[in-house]
Image: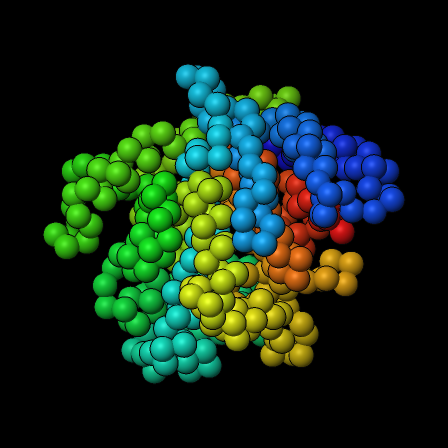
Amino acid sequence: MRATRTRVAVSLLVLLTSISVLTAQGPLLPPGGALSVLETYLESMRQQAGIPGMSAAVLRDEEIVWERGFGFQNLETRVRATPDTPYLVGDITSTLAAVLLLQCVEQRHLDLDEPFRRYGLSQPEPDATLRQVLSHTAPDGAKQFVYSPERFDKLTAVMERCAPQPFRKSIAHRILKPLSMLDSVPGLDLRDPQLSLPDDLFNPQDLERYRHVLDRMAAPYRVGSRSRPERTEIPAMSLTASNGLVTTVRDLARFDKALDAGSSGGLLLDETLDLAWTPVVGPGGDILPTGLGWFVQSYKGERVVWHFGYIPNAYSSLFLKVPDRHLTFILLANSDGLSAPFHLDDGDVTRSLFATLFLRLVK
């Protein structure tokens, strides 16, 4: 598997070198266009990485200016991927969780710097603070930053402390439904009609819609030797603070638009959003590659805000924002090829050749 990923990375790097020559005279995307360049190279990179299906969108000024499906959401049935194809997005779930938790901070139900023991919680650590867990600040001091979805997952209980109801009900009723994210599902396990749920969790109409979405979800694949996809299966997981959201690029575009609206009727106040998108300073004084629920870094002197999803041998995703240019790039795939070769958990989005393609076209 490691050799396969190395071959994929080398092939993608060759493609990216040609992009460097193409963009040597300056950015191609804004203001005049050349989105066809992005489309052409994304398809080539998808094929090189052996990704069966992929969906993508670009937003400018909070509106979709380009969207495409590439390849197949299901190789066996030959159903093509589209912008409405649902995928399991993995760690990108945590960006929605961060919104809910920061809303609790705005409402003064939670404090970013109070230890969890004040709320009667011992996980992930009694002395951990919301700021530390949202920013993946390491608990033991040996390293200042350690990306840990498992630790972030403990924020599920913190959110249920703020809003005394199941976490996925908060996601559904405070984000998915108000934003008309109708092709999004709070948990893979909702496909099972025999699943035992509290009576007041979801109404029958919502549950039926969730099952219809999951029935047309992109099938997961493992990229084997010579980049040949092999069908895999994943467990029917519930929704937590770090995983379990099924969604589409169009629905994530709705989420993105509501984020960028800020104090003008958006999900968070301007000052909260700015805090979330400002790198955290670790206990030793180092600037970490994270804000609150997001990765944050500089690319050619400009702030880039991003997150990724990685479900081994199944799915991967990328959510990349250039806030000062009002640009967003969303990419979802039904293999792990968008994330596995690039070690994005180290906090550097430029390791992703898919991210670098977009950044070189716009910067």
Query: 33 and 232: which one is in front?
Result: 33
Relative height, residue 128 to residue 327 (above, below): below
Can residue 280 be seen? yes
The residue that appears at 32% across and 48% down in the rendered structure is: 186
The residue that appears at 28% across and 33% down in the rendered structure is: 212
The residue furthest front is 32
x, y percentage for residue 183? 36, 41
The residue that appears at 49% across and 35% down in the rendered structure is: 83
x, y percentage for residue 274? 56, 71
Residue 127 in the figure: left or right of residue 142:
left
Relative height, residue 282 to residue 53 (above, below): below
Figure coloring: rainbow
The residue furthest top is 77
x, y percentage for residue 336? 54, 37
When asked about the image quadrant of residue 340, the answer is: top right
Residue 303 in the figure: left or right of residue 128:
right
Can residue 352 be seen? no
The residue that appears at 20% across and 50% down in the rendered structure is: 202
Query: 357 and 177: which one is in front?
Result: 177
x, y percentage for residue 331? 56, 41
Quarter of the image with the N terminus is top right
Relative height, residue 221 to residue 319 (above, below): above
